[in-house]
Image (cartoon, rainbow, N blue to C red):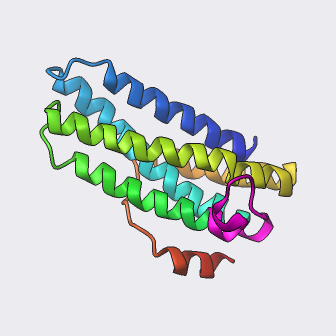
Amino acid sequence: MDICQLILDDHAEQRRLFGLIEQIDPADTGALSAIWGRLAAFLDAHAEAEERFFYPDLLKKGEGANDADDGTVEGETEDAITDHNKLRDAVKAVERHAVGSRAWIEAVGRANVVNSKHMGEEERQGLTDFRRNASLAERHDLGVKYAAFQARHITGVKPVNKDVEAYIETHS
């Protein structure tokens, strides 16, 4: 088990769920509600699990990878936590619209864009950085914690935006 692979697996599931929503007739609000409910809960639990188990260790071991903001692990983490906050806000924005309405579909699309940009950056930056700088044993131990957290929070977590500077200061 490797926390990096678990995160990549989560990313694939997020892409799959967004793709399912795109293929459902907007009039089928029952199916849309069910899949969006699962996706929204999954996105919140995924972000929280990363913030508890991945980014604190990345801040201690990482060096910054590829196109990380300012080339540092702090820049890459700041960007990721900021992205998580933007995604929480985008998910919340979907809830303001009637399921299946044009506004709802557009809000889901905006959440997909925010999430997709974040995942791409995280895959090029944080995950690359951690694979280069953390041992397989460390990645395994964090993977166990990450997987257990996800299992305990299958229905989601309370979404709470983080103060990015305080987060980095606490975990550096």
Total marks in image: 0
- Look at the image and say whether residue 60 sits in the magenta stretch: yes
The span picked out in magenta is: 59-76
Q: Which residue shows up at 52% across the image and 63% down it?
A: 81
User: In the displayed structure, does residue 102 sit left or right of residue 159?
Assistant: left
Is residue 56 visible in this depiction of the protein? no
| Residue 157, image quadrant | bottom left
User: In the displayed structure, does residue 7 sit left or right of residue 106?
Assistant: right
| Residue 167, image quadrant | bottom right
Q: Quadrant of the N terminus?
A: top right
Is residue 124 visible in this depiction of the protein? yes
Q: Position of residue 8 (x, y in %)?
A: 63, 38
Q: Position of residue 56 (x, y in %)?
A: 66, 67
Q: Which residue shows up at 19% across the image and 38% down it?
A: 104
User: In the displayed structure, does residue 127 sit left or right of residue 169?
Assistant: right
Q: Which residue shows up at 13% across the image and 32% down it?
A: 101
User: In the displayed structure, does residue 142 sit left or right of residue 15?
Assistant: right
Look at the picture and state if 165 lies above or below 48.
below
Q: Decide which of 146, 16 is in the foreground and name it.
A: 16
Q: Which residue shows up at 37% across the image and 23% down it?
A: 20
Q: Decide which of 108, 44 is in the foreground and name it.
A: 108
Q: Position of residue 105 (x, y in %)?
A: 23, 34
- Look at the image and say whether residue 42 sits in the magenta stretch: no
Q: Quadrant of the C terminus?
A: bottom right
Q: Decide which of 117, 30 is in the foreground and name it.
A: 117
Q: Position of residue 93 (x, y in %)?
A: 24, 51
